[in-house]
Image: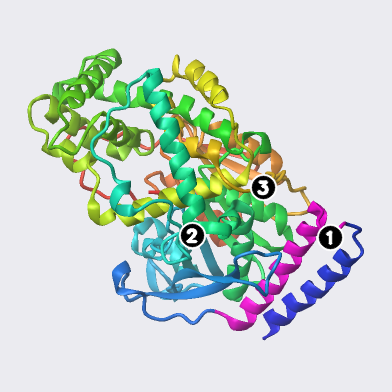
Amino acid sequence: MRTAAVHVAAGSMLLTALAAAPAGAGSPAALHAAELRGTAVAAARAADRGIDFGACPAGQQLPGTVRCGTVRVPLDYARPDGAQIELAVSRARATGRDPDDGERAVPRQGSLVHNPGGPGADGMYFPVSGVLPEWKRIAAAYDLVGYAPRGVGRSAPLSCTDPETFQQAPTDSPVPPPAAHKRERIERAKAYARGCAERAGASLRHYHSLNNARDLDVLRAALGENRLTFLGSSYGTYLGALYATMFPSHVRRMVFDAAVNPDPERIWYRNNLDRSAAFEDRWADFRAWAARHHAVYGLGADARGVQASYEKARARLAREPAGGKVGPEQLQAALSQTAYYDDLWPHRAHALSAYLKGDPRPLVEQARTYPEAAAEAENARAVYLAVECNDAPWPADWAVWDRDNTRLARRAPFETWAGVWTHLPCAYWKGPRQRPLDVRAGRDELPPTLVLAAERDAAAPYDGALELRRRLAGATLVTERDAGSHGIAGGPNSCVNGHLEAYLLKGRVPGRHASCAPHPEPGPGPRTRPVPGPGPR
């Protein structure tokens, strides 16, 4: 195949260049050279092999318009002839027809590959987005391609503990936590890190963002694309930024939706501190909204009153979990979702209100864990921690965590300690850590790229979008003002979607920076409309 020949030639040139680079056999430079060579070799093989798309596994419940296949990648790119793993891929072919005029043909522009974030999120369902009105024009011109990154779902899945014991009984997580609770959480984090090392063995070290970026280049080649068109959401923006830095000549168009701060000094410990601070602001947005609808929910006439209702529910759940399934920790986890999507505000406000009025059923429905989803949830958490823990050094001294988060929790108590308990296994992680790449691209190195950001996004604070635009010359930032949805591509804002379509369909960007008015806040009462868009949900 011609594409394979292109990659073989590129690999030959790369090998020639690497051969001239002096480095000791065990040096970082030599390892980097070997990984570059391994990526070129794997991409050439994938281009030659392609992807044999067929019916998707029945368990995934994808429509017949979506076809599935696999791509083989090296577990270790320094050893491209060694152990291989397979990544699951899904695709819906471009419809080729204008959704407003079915008689008019639309030229195909190739594949649009999406990573929904996490790390640990499964992107196999992205091709289904093409049936939504917000995506039909893009789906007319592009094959919509999703995939499960390494470790996720059917792609050499990782596991760190028995899924049957992963979802624990209702728990209380006092804020601020007493010393005994901290000691118990430290032991739990150590056990989890130990379980990851024991279950995954020597392969665990190969699950990290640099390999995810290399996998993306192999997927590009397998799809027969000389250059990649990519949409990354949340963590997917960091993956895309790494790709743009590592393979700038392979970039066609890139959309970064809900951008993570790529500064190497913030990967990942400091980024998570920033998130906890931003969650407090978004939690305040939800409380202010609930207070404006006090007549409907009765949670409080001001934000302070809504906070008091939340604390009242926590105290009651600590004494007696709702339905025997939901304790204070489950309540906090459910309400933390209000920081991601304001579409959830009516649901969560209703559940909290009903519980305080004596009906626990809506809260149990929204906050409980489901045994049938235990394996998927455990796998997602395992990949999330494996990638973040492997990506960079983390403080190994509990005193550092305790000092930083105690200080932060004084002004941001809602999410801070929950974030600590999520990430603490990284303090006790086994195996070597990567050194974060200095994400950067000069004006002549990349075509124009598009960064989308909501100004009050808590999970990806707005400073990250500004930093990414600064590091990628030629990047355009589109801001949804005074809004906080985590992922705005294909959402309810027609201004944002207009910029997205103009870029993906015509390569047009609105200068250095553009802004859009916020989408309308949800009203009170039941909400049944699904949230559109492919974001990290």
- Amino acid residing under circle 3: Gln
Q: Which mark is residue 290?
A: none
Look at the magenta stretch and give its main secondary structure: helix
Q: Earlier in the sequence, mark 1 or mark 2?
A: 1
x, y percent for residue 492: 37, 45
x, y percent for residue 1: 67, 86
Q: Is residue 206 magenta?
A: no
Q: Which mark is residue 25?
A: 1
Eyeballing the image, is 23 above or below 518?
Answer: below
Q: Is residue 487 visible?
A: no
Residue at the spot x=63%, y=72% of the render?
A: 221
Looking at the rendering, the stretch of residues picked out in magenta corresponds to 24-50
- Amino acid residing under circle 1: Ala
* Mark 1 Cα shell of 10 Å, populated few (<14), some (14-19), many (≥20): few
**Cα gap from disc 3 to disc 1, whole angstroms:** 18 Å
Eyeballing the image, is 75 above or below 276?
Answer: below
Residue at the spot x=24%, y=15% of the render?
A: 308
* Mark 3 Cα shell of 10 Å, populated few (<14), some (14-19), many (≥20): some
SS type, badge 3: loop
**Cα gap from disc 1 to disc 2, whole angstroms:** 29 Å
Label 2: which residue? 151
- Amino acid residing under circle 2: Gly
Label 3: which residue? 434
